[in-house]
Image (spheres, helix red, strand yellow):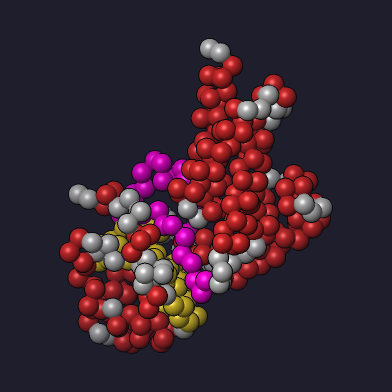
Amino acid sequence: MDEREWLAERFEEQRTHLRAVAYRMLGSVSEADDAVQEAWLRLSRSDAREIENLAGWLTTVVGRVCLNMLRSRRTRREDPLEVHVPEPIVSREDGLDPEHEALLADSVGLALLVVLETLTPAERLAFVLHDMFAVPFDEIGPMVGRSPAAARQLASRARRRVQGEAPAPDPDLGRQREVVDAFFAAAREGEFEALVAVLDPDVVLRSDGGAARPAATHVVHGAEAVARRAMTFARLSPFVRPALVNGAAGVVVAPRGRPFSVMAFTVRNGRIVAIDGLADPDRLKELDLTVLDG
């Protein structure tokens, strides 16, 4: 085995970990794969003999690449988005496939990714690398051009935002599904009070319709307001297909087999605290929903 083959094998051992880092940073599987590929190109141009900790070196490289991608993304946007729902990972209700399971280890719900979208690139990097992957602040600081103490502050600000706006869901998937089913049953039957009963008083509904469907982009707060909104799409209830969305109870709405939206639900203490929906037709086309067939 020559040196390049040896290096390629070592890199493949780290690929799953690197994709997980990049997905949390970017909220996009395709962009995460681009970041990982860039890390391989940089590794292949480096002298591997000078790298003492390959896993740490690669994590740092992917972090820097993702940071640059996030900064470039912000520069391209002329106006701040009211809401941006990241790319969901959709799986069959009977379980995640091994690839998705590895990507979503430690429960990366769509609601969490939505909150991460509101952070600055530096805050997101500090939080993801430290809180999710235990990278020390001594290594994070130079990546964002800050001292370790300043990097710690970045992560702290991000942590407060996440804890306040992205509550951890109930771990029981079966219970999550019961609550989501009750939500759609109430919407289908037009039972307003029953809808309100399954919603947390401070529930947040976020929908991203993209440029092609601006009327479907909105943020709605409060149980009664969300229930009223749910009543308006009750006509779509017959087309709801149960699915796992980022490992939690969710649905794909597909009239005549064409995806109209993907909805993720965060259920906490038996009530829905967040609903995150992607209704952008252009981005829905990019999702691999064949996993739901059969």
Q: Nearer the viewer, residue 202 or 114?
A: 114
Give the percent coordinates (x, y) of residue 52: 71, 27
State yes or no: residue 143 in magenta.
Answer: no
- Is 153 left, or right, of 102 in this rendering? right
| Tally of marks | 0
Q: Magenta part of the protein: which range?
A: 81-109
Give the percent coordinates (x, y) of residue 233: 28, 78
Q: In terms of image quadrants, where is residue 177?
A: bottom left
Residue at position x 66%, y 24% from top?
48
Give the percent coordinates (x, y) of residue 123: 67, 59
Give the percent coordinates (x, y) of residue 245: 38, 58
Residue at position x 56%, y 69% from top?
78
Residue at position x 19%, y 70% from top?
238
State yes or no: residue 94 in magenta.
Answer: yes
**Which secondary structure dominates the residues rendered in magenta?**
loop
Q: Nearer the viewer, residue 268 or 150?
A: 150
Name the residue at the top extreme.
1
Q: Is residue 242 visible?
A: yes
Q: Nearer the viewer, residue 223 or 220?
A: 220
- Is 130 left, or right, of 86 in this rendering? right
In the image, residue 44 sits, relative to residue 181, either above or below, namely: above
- Is 73 left, or right, of 225 in this rendering? right
Q: Is residue 127 visible?
A: no
Name the residue at the left extreme.
256
